[in-house]
Amino acid sequence: MYTPGDRNMLRQALVEAAESDERVSGAALTGSAALDAEDEWSDIDLAFAVTGEPGPVLADFTARMYREHGAVHHMDVVFERTVFRVFLLENTLQVDLAFWPEADFGATTPKFRLLFGTAQDRAPSPPPEPRRLIDLAWLHALHARSSIERGRGWQAEYMISRVREYTLALACVRHGLTAVEGRGLDLLPAGVTAPFEETLVRGLDDAARAFHTVTELFVGELELVDADLALRLAPLVRELAYRAR
């Protein structure tokens, strides 16, 4: 297990490596450290602006992570032209290194603190579209109904969980909270989240009850977001839950 001191030392070493690399024109703290909100479980999040072809820089930093810092595995997440390389270290620390084209390097969320170089002016990342969350919720509700009717308990649990996920995301958007990866869920008012405890599937024979409960909560959020659409969708999704058994 790592300590905050271990994390700070590694982060400083990576920033110094970036400063000494002429192919890296800028660096920024991202994640909780950018907001001075780290706790003992926080990982390392750094963004690097790369001039020219990013491949060689990415390869060199990857080799350094394995050679010097105890990396045991990594994975990539690619968004637009940016590669987020996520490392798992032997002490369980997660290290996220984002390699941005220089022209794209800049803040899209408040979790961005420039360390050196120049940041471009960028539009903030928009929250998820409520209509998209609504559509994903009713789509998974359809499959929850059919899973229950077919006696597929595990699939039903999966689909019900997705309906809950998208309904809670709608609540996060409504309250101005982050609606991705569950980041805003624990900041929702207790009065919003408490009813969702009854949507948890307690066993493979409990899916119908949980489905009925999550459907009503989805309809409640839908009515707050789009009353006209709720008039069309609410009777249908309620019928799905009523008939599931």
Image (tube, rainbow, N blue to C red):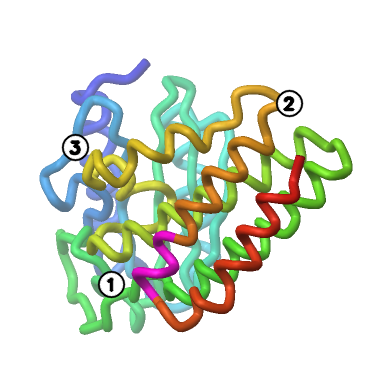
> Which residue corresponds to mark 3?
38
Q: Secondary structure at mark 1?
A: loop
Identity of the amino acid at label 1? Thr
> Which residue corresponds to mark 2?
205
Are circles 2 and 3 on residues that touch, CB within 8 Å?
no
Task: Locate residue 79, reporting x and y percent.
Answer: 50, 69
Task: Locate residue 242, reporting x and y percent.
Answer: 67, 50
Q: Is residue 43 above or below residue 169?
A: above
Q: Is residue 152 left or right of residue 239?
A: right
Q: At x 42% / y 20%, what residue is drawn?
A: 91
Identity of the amino acid at label 2? Asp
> Which residue corresponds to mark 1?
108
Q: Residues within 10 Å of mark 1 (few under 14, many from 20)?
A: some
Instruction: Please identify the quadrant where the C terminus is shown.
Output: top right
The answer to which quarter of the image holds residue 77 is bottom right
Mark 2 vs mark 1, CA separation in Å:
44 Å
Q: Is residue 244 left or right of residue 219?
A: right
The answer to which quarter of the image holds residue 223 is bottom left
Q: Is residue 178 above or below residue 132?
A: above
Is 130 colored magenta in this rendering?
A: no
Q: At x 19% / y 24%, what residue is drawn?
A: 5
- Dominant SS of magenta comes to helix
Q: Nearer the viewer, mark 2 or mark 1?
A: 2
Instruction: Please identify the quadrant where the N terminus is shown.
Output: top left
Mark 2 vs mark 3, CA separation in Å:
41 Å
The range drawn in magenta is 220-225
